[in-house]
Every structure is written in structure tokens, then in C-alpha cells.
């Protein structure tokens, strides 16, 4: 079972969910805005994929932050920022057992396909 973290109105998340459905891969969707996300999950994501990959600097949320709020120079600061602003998380995030994948471009899609033989 894949757990997919994202936003229900995110085009990339919808594409990912559609792909999972087409490939008949069992999944559960967690809406970051409606359902929230725990600090422990954010910490796990940061450790797995890194700060730079997980923080979506192209998001409107990031652009709306003051410069002094954009400090992600340490894991602790990045985790605190993502906990306060979960929509800053690069979407979607896939959790398959211990494997965590952020984004849904071809490399991420290939990594998921390899796990499921899709």
C-alpha cells in the first residue's frame, strides 16, 4: 500500500493518483491541508529526501513568506517551517514501506514503477 501526501486540488497529485489507479496500485491519500501532517512524518521525509528536495520554493506559500521566514539552513528550521506551512511540501510525497519519494517527474515515477513492476 502506498500512502500519498498531497493536496486534492494539485494537478500533479491528481496525475499521480490517476496513474496509481491505472496501474491498480493500492493507495491511501492524505490531504496536507485537510488532514494535516505530523512533525514525525515531516522529520522522516526531510531525512529521507533532504531539505532542498522537500521544500517547494516555487509554491505561492513560499513566495508569500517574508525573507526572514525562509530560513531552512538546518533540519530543525526546515521542519518547523514545514510544520507551520505544510503546503510548502513538494508534492506529492509517496511512502512505500521505508521508501519515500517526493515529486512525480519521470525519475520518481520510474522509482515507483520499479517497486511495483508497473
Image: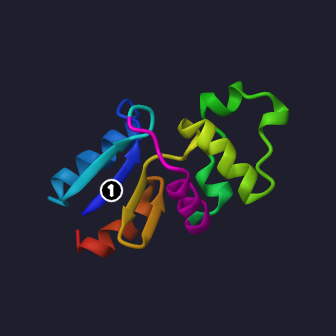
| Left or right, residue 55 beside residue 103 | right
Residue at 81% over, 54% down: 73
Dividing the picture into quadrants, the one containing residue 67 is top right
Colour mode? rainbow
Circle 1: element type: strand
**Residue 116 located left or right of residue 62:** left
Instruction: Point out the residue furthest to the right here.
Output: 68
Q: What residue sits right under mark 1 in the picture?
A: 3
Residue 65 vertical position relative to residue 29 in the rendered view, above or below: above
Could you say which is closer to the camera, residue 49 or residue 105? 49
Q: x, y percentage for residue 3?
A: 33, 56
- Residue ID at (60%, 34%): 59
Q: How many marks?
A: 1
Residue shown at the point (43%, 48%) measured from the top left: 92
Rendering quarter of residue 116 = bottom left
For residue 24, side relative to residue 74 (left or right): left
- Of residues 96 and 60, the one nearer the viewer is 96
Magenta region, mostly helix, strand or loop? helix
Q: Where is residue 105 drawn, in percent x and y?
A: 45, 54
Tell me the magenta residue range: 35-48
Residues 79 and 95: in front is 79
Image spot of residue 5 (x, y percent): 40, 48
Q: Is residue 42 left or right of residue 24?
A: right
Question: Residue 46: x percent and y percent?
Answer: 60, 60
Residue at (54, 36) in percent of width and height: 87
Determine the image quadrant of residue 45.
bottom right
Mark 1 Cα within 10 Å, few/some/many (few <14, many 20+)? Answer: some
Image quadrant in which the N terminus is located:
bottom left
Q: Is residue 37 magenta?
A: yes
From the image, which quarter does the C terminus lie in?
A: bottom left
Amino acid at each position: 500500500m502506498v500512502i500519498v501526501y498531497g493536496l486534492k486540488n494539485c494537478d500533479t497529485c491528481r496525475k499521480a493518483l490517476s496513474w496509481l489507479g491505472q496501474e491498480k496500485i493500492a493507495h491511501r491519500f492524505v490531504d496536507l491541508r485537510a488532514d494535516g501532517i505530523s512533525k514525525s512524518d515531516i522529520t522522516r521525509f526531510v531525512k529521507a529526501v533532504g531539505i532542498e528536495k522537500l521544500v517547494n520554493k516555487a509554491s505561492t506559500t513560499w513566495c508569500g513568506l517574508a525573507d526572514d521566514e525562509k530560513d531552512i539552513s538546518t533540519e530543525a528550521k526546515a521542519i518547523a517551517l514545514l510544520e507551520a506551512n505544510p503546503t510548502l511540501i513538494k508534492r506529492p510525497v509517496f511512502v512505500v514501506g521505508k521508501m519515500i519519494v517526493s515529486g512525480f517527474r519521470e525519475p520518481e515515477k520510474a522509482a515507483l514503477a520499479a517497486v511495483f513492476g508497473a
